Amino acid sequence: MQRRTALTAMLAATAATLTGCATSGGGSSSDDTDSNGTVHLKFQSLAFADTTVAQTKKAVKAWNAEHPKVQVELIQGSWDNVHDQLVTQLAGGTAPDIIHDENADIVGFGQQGYFADLKPYVSSTLRGNVADGVWNSLTVDGKLIAVPTLQQTYVVFANTTALAKAGVPVPTGKSLSWDDFRAMAKKLTGKGSHGVGWGLKQPAATVLSLSANFGGKWFSTSGDKASITVGTAEMQVPRRIHAMAYDDRSIDPTSLTQSGGDVLPGFYAGKYAMMVAGSYVAQQIQEQAPKGFQWAVLPPLAGTSSAQPASAQTLSVSKATKHVKEAAQFIDYFVADANLAKLARSDWLIPATASARTAVREQTGGKDGWGQILVSGENSVDAPFLHAQDYPQWKDQIATPTLQRYLANDISASTLTDQLTKGWKQVAGGGH
């Protein structure tokens, strides 16, 4: 998921160091109760934006004040190296007790048995407050390996001034069909401008996620085995993007080679009337757009549905800790509405719990894109690719470069299908 862009790297480099954090970014999960009977837990947070770091500090400080016998120490981690760090720490039994990560990264660790099963500790209230698809994405061999915190989706941003000039009304309702989106993009394309700018320099996650709009599964799993299917449903999104770029010319083909951040200046300048990006980009638009720039988030894109995979940040507990119960109690405290809603607003991400989404909607009045962003998080489904053990390698080595070539009009759709399928067999050793 989560915002691993050039902006992420920049913000991570400048983010304030968490108060009292160990500079090593690690800690032993074997730390035990001290002589006074106080349990000490280490919590590695990957928060990097100043506002999110501040809210994380505040939540931990409040917990420590209310629970003198269970003290939590913050450790600053980084999205840039968390996977490699956890590989070493989990294998060596030195991981922090409470681990912040994302569902796309933790499933492999869960399959290796490194995380405690949190199912016995999740209350029925919290269980019913999160979509089943999200819980399913965090369940491995019947064990719940994490609790979700914040999510992102892919949404359409619109320059409402450009829409008004073209006589195109701002869509309303619960969803925006792909066909209507394409028709809008055509109407908004003119001399020197395109209806859509879409930064797809790293296209795999976006394409696979939005394929859920059409019921695209991509993978089916059985135990540690996974097989790939690149059929009609899976090809809907890449085919539609390609057609808009090269048949309609309503998507600027150049933008497909850029990052989302690269597309923003063109969006502000009116080169693109719409852009598609992660929902968190609303923060950049709100903070960076020129004075007077009028914008909106459109209803979620929909094919047969507006479903998107649960792309969530997560909190897990190392199986090596001696205090799973206490760690789980802290996580329950951390995802309570009062805290999670503030974290969501500070990071411009979507709370995983329905009650925290309601809180954000009430606090923001749905303004600045929040209304549609929150709606886009209400149709989260489990993504089979998250459970395919070799998915990260396939995504980086096969899917990303192959989709790049297809979106550059260098290969055909049939070649794309063939290479994605054969590439999986290569990565998975031919036996998956």
Image: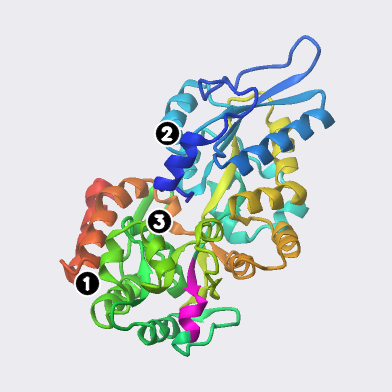
Q: Residue furthest bottom?
A: 167
Q: CA distance from mark 1 to mark 3?
A: 28 Å
Q: Which residues are magenta?
A: 155-164
**What residue type is disc 1 on?**
Ala
> Considering the numbered disc 3 on the image, is that residue within a helix, a strand or a loop?
helix
**On screen, 108 above or below 44?**
below
- In front: 266, or 431? 266
- Chain-order first, disc 1 or disc 3: 3
Q: CA distance from mark 3 to mark 2?
A: 22 Å
Q: CA distance from mark 1 to mark 2?
A: 35 Å
**What residue type is disc 2 on?**
Asn
- Chain-order first, disc 3 or disc 2: 2
**On screen, 280 above or below 298?**
above
Residue 376 picture location, percent across and down: 57, 68
- In front: 313, or 214? 313
- Chain-order first, disc 1 or disc 2: 2
Residue 104 picture location, percent across and down: 46, 48
Q: Which mark is residue 261?
A: 3
> Which residue is under mark 1?
413
Residue 328 picture location, percent across and down: 70, 37
Residue 268, by quadrant, is: bottom left
